[in-house]
């Protein structure tokens, strides 16, 4: 029996064409891209749940569990709609990344010197200590040019003094977002999208910086840093999740993990 199984596998492999091989590679690429996109998000747990439902569908079919199979099959009729609703944010980010000019470039390469990155962390630390509101978006793979074009071009090397001055009270650009690309400040005073929906609570309705950061993290793979002008609290929005109350070291670890 075992030898027959091996023989069947070998026969099947011999029948594989170049088209079949390319088809397998394409499906593998789509699945890999999707799961990388939802990794460490709530959507990952939902994907596992849908996988369990699919497994139960197969088990009830093979085991001839008629009633259970019909119930799951009834759910399967709405499977496509459920996927679109549950993963609309991830699908939007995937399509945005696919159409981005920067999608096929290397993952965020750290060309920045250690001093320049330290300048960034010192600037955020200074802003938090003095309760100066700030909104900073780090570009990853999805291009942020469409948002940078709405602001004022800066195109300057990242330094602590320059970053702090852009958010200093009464500065013409302090209300908008600053967009960073590697070791450069691309633009300042940029407008970011607000989220269509969120679960931050009613007390966040008036905190436009936090909502804008969450909105951009829903649309792109950028890491968005927020400094509250009310409390000086540092927050980080990544992949549609907002983490609040970070210190300098925690921010550094989160950014390095996300940006690669």
Image (cartoon, rainbow, N blue to C red):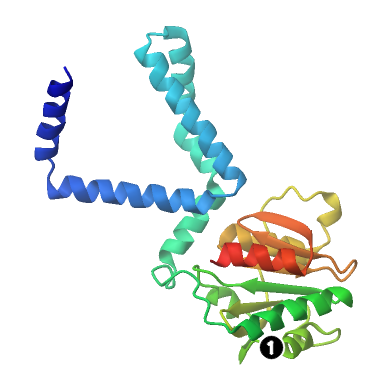
Residue extending farthest front: 3
Q: Residue at x 82, y 79 (%)?
A: 126
Vertical arrangement, residue 61 with respect to residue 152, above or below? above
Give the residue at mark 1.
159
Residue 159 percent location from the top left of the image: 69, 88
Q: Quadrant of the N terminus?
A: top left
Name the residue at 75% across, 90% down.
Answer: 161
Residue nearest the observer in this picture, 125 or 94: 125
Residue 117: x, y in percent?
A: 65, 80
Q: Residue at x 84, y 50 (%)?
A: 202
- Which quadrant holds residue 229? bottom right
Nearer to me, 137 or 112: 112
Q: Is residue 60 above or below residue 50?
A: above
How far from the left and from the top, in percent, is residue 240? 64, 55
> Residue 193's spot in the image, x, y percent?
65, 65
How many numbered discs? 1
Q: Is residue 114 visible?
A: yes
| 10 Å crowding of disc 1: few (<14), some (14-19), many (20+) | some
* Secondary structure state at the residue bearing disc 1: loop
Which residue is depicted at the point 49% across and 28% down?
A: 52
């Amino acid at each position: 029996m075992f030898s027959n199984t091996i023989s069947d596998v070998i026969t099947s492999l011999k029948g594989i064409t170049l088209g079949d091989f390319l088809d397998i590679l394409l499906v593998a690429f789509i699945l890999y891209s999707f799961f990388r996109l939802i990794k460490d998000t709530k959507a990952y747990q939902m994907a596992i749940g849908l996988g369990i439902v699919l497994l139960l569908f197969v088990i009830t079919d093979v085991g001839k569990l008629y009633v259970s199979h019909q119930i799951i099959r009834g759910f399967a009729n709405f499977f496509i709609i459920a996927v679109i609703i549950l993963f609309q944010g991830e699908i939007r980010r995937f399509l945005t990344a696919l159409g981005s000019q920067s999608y096929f470039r290397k993952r965020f390469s750290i060309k920045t010197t250690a001093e320049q990155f330290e300048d960034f962390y010192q600037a955020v630390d200074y802003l938090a200590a003095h309760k100066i509101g700030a909104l900073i978006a780090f570009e990853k793979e999805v291009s942020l040019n469409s948002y940078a074009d709405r602001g004022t071009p800066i195109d300057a090397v990242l330094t602590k003094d320059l970053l702090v001055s852009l958010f200093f009270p009464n500065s013409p650009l302090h209300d908008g977002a600053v967009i960073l690309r590697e070791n450069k400040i691309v633009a300042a005073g940029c407008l970011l999208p607000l989220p269509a929906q969120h679960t931050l609570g009613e007390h966040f309705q008036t905190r436009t910086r936090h909502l804008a950061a969450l909105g951009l993290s829903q649309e792109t793979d950028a890491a968005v840093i927020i400094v509250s002008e009310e409390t000086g609290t540092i927050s980080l929005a990544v992949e549609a999740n907002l983490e609040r109350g970070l210190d300098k070291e925690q921010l550094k670890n989160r950014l390095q993990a996300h940006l690669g």
